[in-house]
Image (cartoon, grey):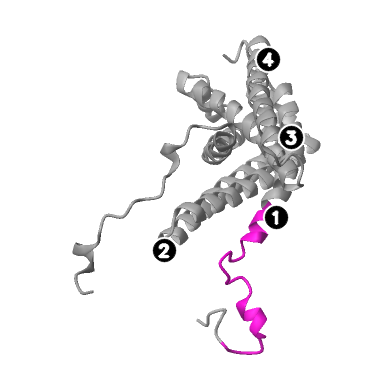
Amino acid sequence: MSDSKAQKPERPLSPHLQVYRPQMTSMTSILHRATGAALSIGLALFSWWLVAASIGPEAYGVFGRFVSSKIGLLMLLGFTIATYYHLANGIRHLFWDAGKGVNIKSAYATGAFILFFTLLATVGTWYCVIVYGGAFL
Amino acid sequence: MSMKWENKGFKTPLARARGLGASRSVVDNWVKLRVTAVANVLVIAWFLWFLKNNIGASHAEFTADLADPRNAIMMILFIITVFYHASLGCREIIEDYFHSEWMKIAKLVGAYMFFFTMGVASIFSVLKIAFTVGV
């Protein structure tokens, strides 16, 4: 048992993520984490917004120019999608925690519902921003 | 430094063992995540309404609206519950994916510093606006 590393036989590994077909259940779960992590990092943008506003109009203008640039708008769009998704799926999780809807059929139905909600809420929000916030864009 | 599990002082064996099982103190984290999640739903409803009111607002209009005590209070509550929820969520992610104890601690400390710094900066900014605009 001295040179165990050299003699270690190749053992089969248990199957991992890549062998599974994407399912509504696993994908919505992974997306919840991904959007949560993205939103956490995105809080830096939120802080910048408030700090810039407290410094003065010039600093607020710099922030405004950043968020109305192409990359800034893309970040805001991502923020919107992630917020609505994480909000809706978070409520779905709270129902599960309460023991409601813990079965495959409900999980697929509520999963489809939150994806539809995310799309609808994002489109609705940006419609309002473009219609009422023309000067800002 | 004496460790929690060392047999010193007046602690009962149960008190020394608590929180050192396989799940550590993570149930506490789990409960806090749910409580802040419910709080987040409430403050986000206000936040969306606040954003709607300030679409296309100038710096003067925006700071005047934020300086309204009702909005300033809600914004501070929003910051506290959202940043707290984010730090709890990141703790969960970090504990799941980093298995080396030192790497895990380093990442956790880094994450807490990030959220604490951003949170304090945000709250201070709201207070400054609330106390200086339109007084």
Magenta stretch encompasses residue B22:
yes
Q: Chain of mark 3?
A: B
Question: Crowdedness of circle 1 by 10 Å Cα count: few (<14), some, many (20+)?
Answer: few
Marks 2 and 4, how far apart at CA: 47 Å
Q: Which circle's residue, 1 or 3, is located before the other in the chain? A: 1
Q: Secondary structure at mark 2?
A: helix
Marks 1 and 3 in Cβ contact (< 8 Å): no
Q: Secondary structure at mark 1?
A: helix
Looking at the rendered structure, the kind of residue marked 3 is Ala
The answer to whether residue B11 is above or below residue A115 is: below
**Residue A52 in view:** no
Marks 4 and 1, how far apart at CA: 36 Å
Image side of residue B132 versus residue B98, left or right: right
Q: Which residues are magenta?
A: B7-32
- Nearest the viewer among A50 and A75 is A75
Marks 3 and 4 in Cβ contact (< 8 Å): no
Residue at figure coordinates x 19%, y 70% from the top left: A3
Image side of residue B37 versus residue B97, left or right: right
The residue carrying mark 4 is A128
The residue carrying mark 2 is B102
Magenta stretch encompasses residue A110:
no
Residue at figure coordinates x 61%, y 11% from the top left: A135
Q: Position of residue B42 (x, y in %)?
A: 77, 38
The residue carrying mark 1 is B31
